[in-house]
Amino acid sequence: MPDSLKIKIDSAVAEIELNRPDKANAMDEELWFALGDCFRELDENEAVRVCILRGAGSHFTAGIDLKFLQSVGQEVEHFDCEGRKREYLRRKIIKLQSAFTQIEECRKPVLAAIHGGCIGAGVDLVSACDMRYSTSDAVFQIKEIDLGLTADVGTLQRLPKLIPLGIVRELAYTGRKFSGEEAREFGLVNSCYADQESMITAVREIAEQIADKAPLAMRGVKEMLLHSRDNSVADGLNYVATWNSAMLLSADLEESVMAMLQNRSAEYKDWWFHSSFRLLRTII
């Protein structure tokens, strides 16, 4: 991973930190695609059960680095054919979308801890997370309208699933800034905190509670919630029946029941198979 993205794993919790504090964590091309790669790897890492996404320095992120935005426009100039120019630009946008979709598709819950500015693409980024927490004085903004752009990497698709549509329209049409307290009132963030330190402490506690739960069941919960967001109740019920017919009789269930009967904390060994499989491959 590049220096602009720091990852620390402790007690099954991965902390991912945007690390361009001198640029207000503005996302250049390297950082943007490193985020997608990071969550793709964390999805496969059986030692990780939950993720926290945060920013270094005074801000969560100022959004896309404007130099990166300019370079995207310049990349198409070498095409003589207008059709191919437009196709290349479309594919570039889809690639940018895919990096944030990796966060949504990561099987592990992702908690965003937001302080300072969360501007433009920052809103796209946190909209792809499972939960959002912020400081009271955090500043959010759907900035794209002020740049003459239509937000195109997730805000306009995911935000209407999180907060009332009328609020989304107001924020997207006007591009006005709104505080962490307003974000909480809208339902965009779960809780607000007085400062970054108390927020990180609280978010870490929530993450550890999640990490203590049965990993396979947690993945199922996330899968079902994402599916239910975009499908009917009937489809959701059918899907969860199919899922549990395959996943219900797990070692996690057995350990959960035994822990309750013995009045102790459950201990899930989710990485056993992964380690054994790697050992088997080495032997073969």
Image (cartoon, grey):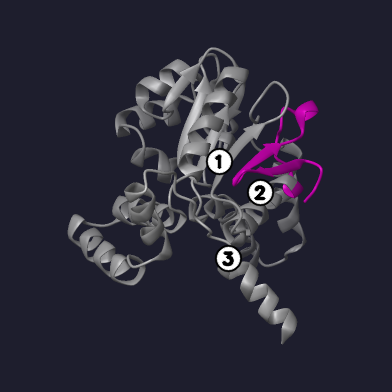
User: Which residue occupies the foreground of this view, 97 or 81?
Assistant: 97
Please say whether residue 128 is visible from this viewpoint: no
Residue type, label 3: Trp
Which of the 4 image quarters holds residue 5? top right
User: Which residue occupies the foreground of this view, 202 or 153?
Assistant: 202
Q: Which residues are magenta?
A: 1-30
- Residue on which disc 2 sits: 35
Query: What's the residue at 44%, 16% (across, down)?
Result: 181
Question: Could you say whether the residue bearing mark 2 is in a helix, strand or loop?
Answer: helix
Asked whether the residues under the numbered discs 1 and 3 touch, taking CB atoms below 8 Å apart as contact, a structural biologist would say no
Is 196 drawn above or below residue 275 in the view shown?
A: above
Query: Which mark, by number, is residue 219?
Result: none
User: Per the image, is 14 magenta?
Assistant: yes
Query: What's the residue at 55%, 22% (across, down)?
Result: 199
Question: Could you say whether the residue bearing mark 1 is in a helix, strand or loop?
Answer: helix
- Residue on which disc 3 sits: 272
- Residue on which disc 1 sits: 125
User: Which residue occupies the foreground of this view, 43 or 277?
Assistant: 277
User: Per the image, is 135 magenta?
Assistant: no
Asked whether the residues under the numbered discs 1 and 2 touch, taking CB atoms below 8 Å apart as contact, a structural biologist would say yes
Percent of width and height locating residue 145: 52, 32
Percent of width and height locating residue 128: 49, 44
User: Which residue occupies the foreground of this view, 14 or 6?
Assistant: 14
Q: Nearer the viewer, mark 3 or mark 2?
A: 3
Question: Could you say whether the residue bearing mark 3 is in a helix, strand or loop?
Answer: helix
Q: Earlier in the sequence, mark 3 or mark 2?
A: 2
Q: Give the class, few, some or many, for how many residues have Cα within 10 Å of label 3's Cα (few <14, many ≥20).
A: few
Q: CA distance from mark 3 to mark 2?
A: 27 Å
Q: Earlier in the sequence, mark 1 or mark 3?
A: 1
Q: CA distance from mark 1 to mark 2?
A: 10 Å
